[in-house]
Image (cartoon, rainbow, N blue to C red):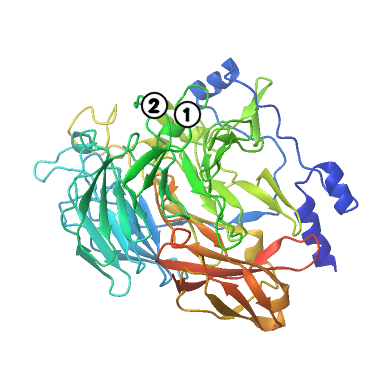
Amino acid sequence: MASERRRLMRATSTLPRALAFALLAGGIASCSAGDIGNESSARQRAELQGGPIVQPQSVSTWFGTWGTPSTGPSQVIHASLLRNGKILAVGGSQYNCCYYWGRVSTYLYDIASGSWTSLGGPYAANEDAFCSGHAHDHLGRVIHAGGLLGGTDPPPQLLCEGNGIGIPKSARYDVSTGSWANLSYAPARYYPTVVAGTGHMWLFSGNYLGTRDIWVSGYGTSSWSPFFLDCPGCTTYPRVHLLPDGRLFTASPKNCDDDRRNYVLNPSAWTLTKAGEDDVPDDGGTNFYDHFYSSSVLMPLTPSGGAYPSATVMLTGGQTYYKKDVLSTSCPTGGPGPCWVPTEPRPTDTVDGVTFPVRRYQSIATLLPTGQVAVTGGVYGGPEGQGADSTRVRAPEIYGTDIGLIWLNEWTLTNPAQVTRNYHSVALLLPDGRIWTAGSNKNGLGSDCPGDLCSDGNCNGFPDNRERQVEIFSPWYVTEPGRPVITSWPANMSANGQWYSIGVGNGEGNSIHKVALMRAGSVTHAFDSDQRLVWLDITFKSANYIRVNAPYTTGAAPPGDYMLFILKRTSLYSSHIPSVGVWTRR
């Protein structure tokens, strides 16, 4: 009973005071999110002075804790979760201006032991996978595409001489064999986005002589081919999301475009159309959301009547976070849709008496099996989002408060990390529900880069700016006793609504209220194109098993490897507690 009351107190600790007291006598009220603020001189001084940015509000310490950081052999620039309990970690030249650490810095990280194993690839020894794009294919293999055009030794060539010029390379890592295979006819790309579709892998743009074209590679094939369609605004790591109807949405055009609209690619019709007539938010004139400094996430997909009427994308990182329901035909404020709308007020900072929401350049939004979003890492200020580590923002923000029968769309701060995450950091959801964080360049700078990045070519031992520490965030449910247990599950699932049985341990089948299907993540540069959560309809319950319907469309859950979670509610107002995830293939 005492444990249940503690859980209830945690669940109500972030609610408005009136509601909290209504749910629990003596409930804890949440702190005010504060005023929106403005582009004040106080904030500008804080940025320019490079002083530490603080968030003075109360922190919901119960939500999660950080483990002890450990140091790995490489800076992780690209990370992909594998179904064998490992993470494919690719560093390439690791933002070293002189390639001092080489180009093939690829490892397997063992989640259970925390150990690292050296691995060759993705490309040949003189080809750099640094700043490639990547995603999982229909068999859970990881496809990398593009990278940095570097120099040859001797003599050493500085990274900056090849910066922005891509290489025509692509390779696929097969988790079952532990080996790489080349994909032919890859376009030369740097900072591209790779996305899994309903029947193809998609390669969007990437900075190469200003090109914005789209390429495809059919599932089961080993080559790329042009789609013969350009995407306005798609240059450096465009934020692209597969929609449940099979179309693809681009969330962040680059600021050099004539317009600042979003676009939707319809592969079957071979068309690219505007997703609303509104501009991408410019964050007070800084054009923050146009770049790879912000994060973007497709919110959980909820079925209704065998379909998915809503597909909401959230932009995070700036002063205000925004959402757009791409399938909506109207705006909340009136007029045709879809359109961007601000999320609920966020945690704030106060400088010289002026209060404003904190920006988080280079932060990453990660979906939790509860349906919540955790935004981790980031720095507050600096040129082009690559600010000093002294402006770190270490406390994660959690979107959504779940108290069982009530869901509140609000932001909550929780315990801060120890390690600063700046440019080139990553975050991945693990099967047990923790978040694995790694990477970062100290102060957003490359290593062996004298002066203004590449002011001379001596390669004479300037500081190592790599952050090689791994730190893992454990939400409250990780150590919660009584997590539900999956005893049996389908090894494969369709995408036509077919029913499947899931075994539930301890006779708790009737307590299961939600089932989440979550795709294995693959993240770089503050964005995970693979990340998605699909709620499954529960059609039957008994003590020892439940029956669910598979996703209703391939667009909702494209083929590949997924983690299956069941969630139970232990009392009227308790949060839903997720199980440890198990692997299935869609």
Badge count:
2
Which residue is found at the position 60% from the left and 44% from the top?
395
Against 562, residue 416 (above or below) is above
Query: Contact (CB < 8 A) between labels 2 and 1?
Result: yes
Lower sequence index among marks 2 and 1: 2
Residue 483 in the image: x percent, y percent?
A: 66, 71
Quadrant in which the N terminus is drawn = bottom right
Task: Tell me: residue 419, above or below residue 164.
Answer: below
- Crowding around mark 2 (Cα neighbors within 10 Å: few <14, some 14 to 19, many 20+) is some
Disc 2 secondary structure class? loop
Q: Quadrant of the C terminus?
A: bottom left
Q: At 82% from the left edge and 47% from the top edge, which residue is drawn? A: 28
As rendered, which of 316 and 560 lies closer to the eye?
560
Residue at image mark 2: 259
Count neighbours of disc 1 (C-alpha within 10 A) and say few if under 14, some if 14 to 19, many if 20 or more: some
What kind of element bears circle 1? loop
Which residue occupies the foreground of this view, 75 or 334? 334
Percent position of residue 212, x then y: 27, 38
Q: Quadrant of residue 164?
A: top left
Which of 38/233 is in front?
233
Q: CA distance from mark 2 to mark 1?
A: 8 Å
Residue occupying the far right of the picture: 25
Residue 462 seen in this snapshot:
yes
Left or right: 388 as drawn, with respect to 503: left
Residue at point 63%, 27% (across, down) = 356
Q: Name, please, the residue furthest toward the left.
A: 154
The amino acid beneath tag 2 is: Asp
Disc 1: which residue: 279
Amino acid type at image mark 1: Asp
Of residue 30 and residue 92, the one placed in the foreground of this image is 30
Residue at (66%, 38%) from the top-left corner? Answer: 344
